[in-house]
Image: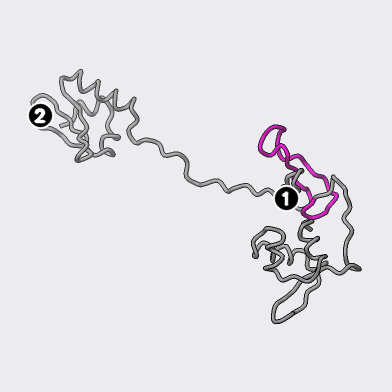
């Protein structure tokens, strides 16, 4: 059990809202902690609200075991979560509850979930544009990009200008763009 929560519960009956303010956590997180340790905590209704406390005869004395998990109080194997000097270097993972905590603050560390999307790749990278422009120039034509219409314009000798969207332009190779009708 969190030491701040334990200390707050020992000082007397408090509502979940008051406990949340004392330990500096959200009210919903405080309720989760109360449910997780329901066997140690006493509860009753006062003025229509539930109040929680730990009585002195029920109080579990804290064992200052530096190898025990602060999240589940287990003495099971505590494995270092990452290499020294890295983000998880000062963290351990409990083999009993499979949660990671900071060894200094003794608080749980939650990792943000990675996003499914990666960095967007350009449809027409510059090296491909350069290769197509050079091929058209060698064939005696001109390839330009019209910003207003956001289209590529191909000018070949003796042919009408051909307009292409970015997707159409991406499907072309330097050889195929020169032989375009």
Q: Residue at x 73, y 50 (%)?
A: 107
Q: Which residue is mark 2?
A: 159
Q: Which residue is mark 1?
A: 107
- Name, please, the residue furthest toward the top: 138
Which of the two discs, 1 and 2, labels the residue nearer the N terminus?
1
Q: Residue at x 68, y 63 (%)?
A: 20
**Residue stretch rendered in magenta on the structure:** 70-96
If the image is split into quadrants, where does the C terminus sit? top left
User: How far from the left and from the top, in percent, is residue 82?
Assistant: 70, 37
Give yes or no for contact between labels 1 and 2 (Cβ–Cβ under 8 Å): no
User: Closest to the observer: 57 or 93?
Assistant: 57
User: Closest to the observer: 154 or 64?
Assistant: 64
Query: Alpha-carbon neighbours of circle 1 within 10 Å: few (<14), some, or many (≥20)?
Result: some
Q: Residue at x 76, y 48 (%)?
A: 106
Residue 77 in the figure: left or right of residue 25: right
User: How far from the left and from the top, in percent, is residue 27?
Assistant: 65, 65
Q: Secondary structure at mark 2?
A: loop
């Amino acid at each position: 059990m969190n030491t701040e929560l334990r200390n707050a519960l020992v000082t007397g009956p408090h509502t979940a809202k008051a406990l949340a303010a004392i330990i500096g956590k959200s009210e919903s997180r405080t309720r989760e902690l109360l449910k997780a340790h329901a066997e140690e905590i006493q509860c009753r209704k006062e003025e229509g609200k539930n109040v929680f406390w730990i009585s002195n005869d029920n109080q579990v004395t804290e064992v200052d075991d530096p190898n025990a998990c602060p999240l589940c109080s287990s003495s099971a194997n505590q494995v270092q979560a990452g290499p020294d000097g890295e983000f998880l270097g000062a963290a351990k993972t409990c083999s009993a509850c499979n949660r990671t905590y900071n060894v200094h603050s003794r608080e749980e560390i939650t990792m943000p979930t990675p996003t499914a999307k990666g960095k967007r790749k350009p449809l027409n990278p510059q090296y491909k544009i350069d290769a197509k422009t050079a091929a058209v120039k060698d064939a005696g034509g001109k390839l330009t990009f019209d910003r207003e219409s956001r289209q590529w314009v191909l000018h070949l000798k003796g042919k009408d200008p051909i307009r292409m969207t970015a997707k159409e332009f991406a499907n072309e190779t330097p050889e195929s763009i020169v032989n375009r009708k």
